[in-house]
Image: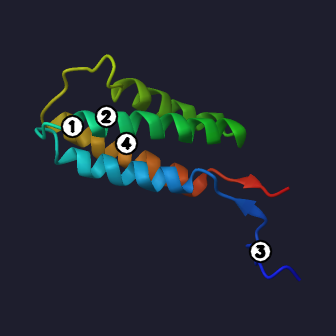
Amino acid sequence: MSGTTRPADGFQRNALAPGLLGGLICLVGAFALDWPGYTVVLYAVAILALICAWFAIQARQWWWLVGFVPIAVLWNPVLPFAFAGTYWMAAHVLAGAVFIVAGLLIKVRRA
């Protein structure tokens, strides 16, 4: 025995860490809209959305792209949109939920 244990279900969740981190950053970003360093939030959310999208493609769960591609585009810091207010705050919360749920549900069978 090698001393390591594996989960009994035989799956690994590659998107769990970026999904939880992306959800946390989205929720923090919802309350930091007027912060001067808000561009950091935009970069982090866009990059983590692309990472989660890549893991969804690898897991052959294409339907997650419906959530992550718009997140990557709307939170794009290179060509930012001038969103503000209650609806943009709600979009942060919704994007955070997408990140967390996807992180929990995107999984691939261990080799």
SS under mark 2: helix
Colouring used for the render? rainbow
Q: Nearer the viewer, mark 1 or mark 4?
A: 1
Q: Which mark is residue 38?
A: 1
Total labels: the figure holds 4
Residue ID at (52%, 56%): 17
6 left or right of 43 in image: right
The image shows residue 86 at horizontal and vertical percentages of 14, 38
Q: Is there CB contact under 8 Å for labels 1 and 2?
A: yes
Q: How far is mark 1 from mark 4, CA to CA?
A: 16 Å
Look at the picture and state if 83 lies above or below 24: above
Look at the picture and state if 100 lies above or below 72: below
Q: Which mark is residue 95?
A: 4
79 left or right of 1 in image: left
Q: How far is mark 3 from mark 4, CA to CA?
A: 31 Å
Type of residue at label 3? Answer: Ala
Q: Is there CB contact under 8 Å for labels 3 and 1?
A: no
Residue ID at (44%, 46%): 98
The reply to whether residue 108 is in sight is yes
Type of residue at label 1? Answer: Tyr
40 left or right of 18 in image: left
Report the residue that reaches farthest toward the top. Answer: 79
SS under mark 4: helix
Q: How far is mark 1 from mark 2, CA to CA?
A: 7 Å
Disc 3: which residue: 8
Look at the picture and state if 7 lies above or below 75: below
